[in-house]
Image (cartoon, coloured by chain):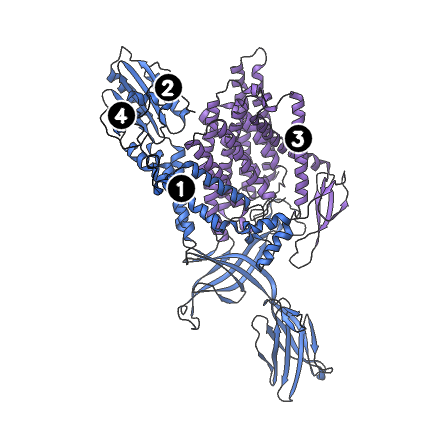
Amino acid sequence: MQLYQISDLLLDIAFILYVLSSIVFIVAMTGKNWAGRDPKQHEMRFGRIAYWMAVIGFIAQTGYVVTRWVAGGHSPTSNMFEFMAFFDYCIILAYLIIYRIYKMTVIGAFVLPLGVIMLAYSYVFPKEITPLIPSLQSYWLHIHVTTAALGEGILAVGFAAGLMYLILTIPQKVATKSTRWLEIVLAVVLMLVGFILMESTFARMDQKTVFEFTEQVAAPNGQAAPTKVEYTMPAIVAPANSKIIQAGPMSPWFTAPEWMEGKDAARKLNTMIWSVLSGIVLYGGLRLIFRKRLAAAIQPSLEGMDPELVDEISYRAISIGYPVFTLGALIFAMIWAHEAWGRFWGWDPKEVWALIVWLFYSAYLHLRLSRGWIGAKSAWMSVIGFVIILITLVVVNLVIAGLHSYAGV
Amino acid sequence: MDQRKCECGHTNPVGTLLCESCGKPLEVDLTDQSAFPDMRYEGMARRSQTYTTKIVDRVWNTFSSVKVAIWIIVVILVASGLGTIFPQQQYIPVPVPTELDVEQFYTNTYGILGTIYYKLGFHNMYSSWWFVTLLVMLGTSLIICSLDRVIPLYKALNKPRLNQHKSFLKGQKLYAETKQPEDRSAEEILSQTAEVLKKKGYYLFQTDRALLAEKGRFSRWGPYINHIGLILFLIGVLMRSLPGFHLDEYVWVREGETVPIPETPYYVKNLNFKIEYYSEDEMVEKLDLKGGAIAKNYQTDAIMYLNRNADTPGAKPDLVEVLSGPIIVNHPMKYEDVYLYQSGYQEMRLGALNFTLIDLKNGSKELAPFKLDLYNPDQEIKVTDGLKIRVLDYFPDFVMGKDGKPATQTNLPKNPMFALEVLNDKEAINEKLVYLQGSILTQKDNPRYGLKINMPDLVNISGLNVRTDKALPLIFFGSFVFMIGVSMGFFWQHRRIWVQLQEGNVLIAGHTNKNWFGLRKEVQGMAEQTNLSVTLEDKTKA
């Protein structure tokens, strides 16, 4: 067995453990109201089992990081798969750090599922170890990307606690603007889940649709070459001016607008439509099962928790994550940019979005420290902040082309 | 104005909220706990809260407001985001030589939205006057906000507030009161608590009936230090627009060529350019590269020269070598302030055309080879004794112009066209030839001389980016200061615990700027270890 295969195996083990840990955490929370149980004891017992599962999963993932680093000769942060897996690793690490401070296990009931989603998301991308292209051959790859991911991981824990605060405190008796927005947030999370389900299901079914079209942008030799694009998901939307050369399970309903640039624009749009649809189906299904708002269904499991402590944890995570993020995603980034491109800052979309994340959390901290935005307001901001982080990590790489397009998708 | 004088006898400056000496709230109804001033700036008088009449005061007050600062941050945030919807002009993937091309790029690629984007100037957003103005406003806000707060805060924290008024203690978020245990004297209680807190790393300030334990005061300066870092950073950024501080040029250098580096006294010579690719056994896993290859290295071996005659206009360059070595991606060549970056290449471009002159009348006898340099062709080439080739016309990138006359599109030899003349002095022959796109056209039907086309010389051209950034040390120093500031502010907290004995009661109050959870644990631990039965009140302020 090759070293990289061991590394893949370790990651699979970590993934399974995170899934089990999430399930046990949810049992710890929901099961405390089961008949014939002492709620406190139940939560403690199952919470501890789940916590240790997460710890063992984390150790397995550490093994993955180390073996892949050794096998590939560079830190596993050089493409979208490696980065998302590493980001997930940082989320779990941040959870363990926050746990050491506050000893509050149930935060895990929100962080671990988030970790599962992120790791599952990384599996969507090509997993091969590729050698480093010249622009990535720098020790700053290790320093900049790992520190940035760690900062984002800690901020993600701030989001998980913030979301928990909102579910815990927003009154669910009547429908308000807050309950509606909270449902939207949960639905968006389910869309991400839907995307992962769709992507992995259709990849296994192997029912590709292949389109051929002539790319708008002129090739270097001045001739427009016909391009092929493969959809793994059934085609709802076809690329503009294209023809099908291998039909899939269904014929497309409409074509993408012509201004959508790039070879894969239409495919990404198609994927997004599937994600949104499947997320809505998942959400609708859960609503039908529970017959109430999802947040209202979760709320009773959180009963008895101290909202002020949850608020404090969210804030603490953000106040630890913010300096780490600044160092990794901005300062180290600027030093590397200076060494690689000769300018420390170039308003590349990825740079701009890292700045947006930083400005947003700066605003969060000023509002909290100077304007007394604690509790719900602060929790909403931690949620929005995480959305901006996801835009920076995912949307900017996959949708807006720029210098950081190492996605490989 | 008598309000300035506190009942303890201390005279406070106008605008003070908590007496500088005893901490008693001024101008506040003592029975109303919710009216207790915020502890953020220790209840000191701040300029912005005190003077409001003159224009200077109003400007000062606007920029000293955190609310205004947040609005500036939010506006910059939104504007930055808008600038990434479509690419900035510098990132347009196709060449746009004129302003019209730029406009057409946005219109043709993105439709009506692209046109609006262009018309609003969003394609050059980050260097626009209004975006720079926003950054300057942010800098101003940083300076004024900090000054408005740091000076009173320094005054307040410089001397520890030990003997605080009971109303000050009661006003704290963490407060407890209990009967003095009868088995212990005031001194004993204070010394016991002092011992516990000392072990926790607190500095102690003591009188016979009062104790103040304090730690992490320096963390209160964190925000101001990180703001200083940001101000230095912004100054560095603005300095780059001063002449001489910032240089950004691009040079293309052929292998073997030496070119001046614009705006500097230096020259650079390209000895060799190479690209290396990963071989299959260098890859960990078998990859499906679809016939492509993964680049491993782009490298220019270069020599940098200093022109000693750079200051004398019109003088011939006098070059001395100052540095030589490879220029690799991520490893620029650096000499003094000038950095050379490997940032582009053109591989296997035509460098020179090779021909052999043939005597057609003599059984197509090959006479001699000759070379036409495409970048700097000689006007006249001596082929053999008495035989010369003269270059009559040269178009590096030939097109037939609209007026029917030959022209060149660019000065790069992409499609070279030569008009040549073969001169034989001895026999007074003079024939004209044209070379175009791999074929020879002759003037006469039955010429004496012809050309055999040989393999051309191919060269690699290396694209080097030239940069100077004299503000960089300041920018990185500012970042470093910022990191120190945020670390101080976020990884440590300023905690204070007051213990006082008044009228047979033990009063305990605590204050921290962050992490109440940690402070509460510490105060509880202290009460348990010293056997004081207290219930901590925890007032949450709305």
**Residue bearing the label numbered 4:** B22
Q: CA distance from mark 3 to mark 1?
A: 45 Å
User: Considering the numbered disc 2 on the image, is that residue within a helix, a strand or a loop?
Assistant: helix
Q: CA distance from mark 4 to mark 1?
A: 32 Å
Can you tell which of label 3 and label 1 is closer to the viewer?
1
Q: As displayed, is residue B221 above or below residue B122?
A: above
Q: Amino acid at mark 4?
A: Cys
**Residue bearing the label numbered 3:** A280
What is the crowding at mark 2: few (fewer than 14 residues within 10 Å), some, or many (at least 20)? some
The answer to whether marks 2 and 3 sit on the same chain is no
In the visual, does A346 lie left or right of B15? right
Mark earlier in primary sequence (4, 1): 4
Mark earlier in primary sequence (2, 1): 1
Q: As displayed, is residue B204 above or below residue B334?
A: above
User: Considering the numbered disc 4 on the image, is that residue within a helix, a strand or a loop?
Assistant: loop
What is the crowding at mark 1: few (fewer than 14 residues within 10 Å), some, or many (at least 20)? many
Q: Residue at x 52, y 57 (%)?
A: B342
Q: As displayed, is residue A382 above or below residue B365?
A: above
Q: Position of residue A224 (x, y in %)?
A: 69, 56
Q: Amino acid at mark 1?
A: Ser
**Chain B painted colour:** blue
Q: CA distance from mark 2 to mark 1?
A: 40 Å
Q: CA distance from mark 2 to mark 4?
A: 26 Å
The image quadrant of residue B351 is: bottom right
Disc 2: which chain?
Answer: B
Task: Supply the letter of whichever chain is purple.
Answer: A
Can you tell which of label 3 and label 4 is closer to the viewer?
4
**Residue bearing the label numbered 1:** B141
Disc 3: which chain?
Answer: A
Q: Position of residue A167 (x, y in %)?
A: 55, 24
What is the crowding at mark 3: few (fewer than 14 residues within 10 Å), some, or many (at least 20)? some
**Residue bearing the label numbered 2:** B524
